[in-house]
Image (cartoon, rainbow, N blue to C red):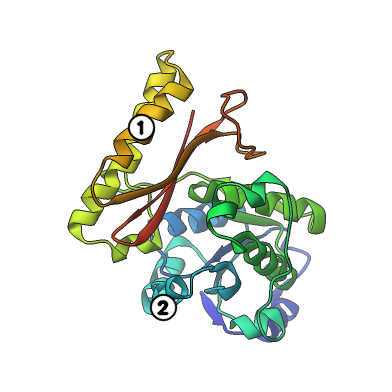
Amino acid sequence: MIILKSTIELNNWFIENLNELVENVGFVPTMGALHMGHASLIEKASSECQIVVVSILVNPTQFNEKADLQSYPRNFDNDVIVAEKAGGTILFTPTPKDIYGGEPYAEPVDYGPITSAFEGLSRQGHFDGVVSVVDKLFISVKPNRAYFGSKDLQQVAVVERMSNERHPKIKIVSCDLIRDENGLALSSRNIRLSYAGIILAQNISKELQTIAERVKEGGDMIESVEIAKKKLKNLEGLELEYISGVNYKTFSISTENRGWSHIIVAARVEGVRLIDNIEL
């Protein structure tokens, strides 16, 4: 695996090394602090593509809280090990100014509920930043396939919408959500949790699993969500932002369970914001 630190280095490498025999370039965009969830994306990309570009860029335009940006975990040495072991060909590490061509800035984006509801409502401007940086990364990398984790379910919907409009030749691949041995969805932010925080956070996935099991047995979706909501709200130290049924394509806010494909949730534990979801 080679490390390329700028868009110029990446472009020059492509000019020197890409030829007619390379038909499939895979791309895994990340913000670093790589874990086994990221590794699973890289492994899937390497099994389907001849070249896999893994980018690391902590993108300032998708953070609506300055403290969250400043405290976002960074561990470059470990990132190199994880990316290479998982099958990355290139580790692309541009600066924000490089990828944006100047001071980072994101134009407002309105895709309806998929950018305004849930994560879009809780994190104003977040999806503006996601659309902006992924668009610019796609222009730089020019992949055939791009891989995203389904933990960020709403982000996948936003990226698919953007890609359909601006990069229709790129296939967006949504990959399975990866959990630890106790069911907690893997996230770079998890390392900021204490042992007690991790134990508390595990209640999020437990309630999602309980909802899915009730629905599978014929239980009412809305009632099941309401029961889980009450349980999570009553947990001391856990601040529930939302838990709701959604259709993963539209993210329309509805009190009815028509077309629900997933249950999504967001909560804070020890000041760390966690999201999770489960397919029904």
- Separation of residues labelled 1 and 2 (CA atoms): 38 Å
Kind of residue sitting beneath label 2: Phe
Q: Is 165 left, or right, of 263 in this rendering?
A: right
Which residue has dot 1 on it? Answer: 228
| Residue 130, position as x, y percentages in the image | 63, 63
User: In percent of the image, x 58 and y 53: which residue is there?
Assistant: 121
* Secondary element at image label 1: helix
Q: Residues within 10 Å of mark 2 (few under 14, many from 20)?
A: some
Occupied quadrant, residue 77: bottom left
User: In percent of the image, x 34 and y 40: which residue is there?
Assistant: 205
Which residue has dot 2 on it? Answer: 76
Kind of residue sitting beneath label 1: Ala
Furthest-top residue in this view: 218
User: In percent of the image, x 67 and y 85: which residue is there?
Assistant: 103
User: In percent of the image, x 37 and y 63: which residue is there?
Assistant: 189
Q: Is 224 left, or right, of 246 in this rendering?
A: left
In front here: 28 or 153? 153
Furthest-left residue in this view: 196
Tell how many labels.
2
In front here: 37 or 102? 102
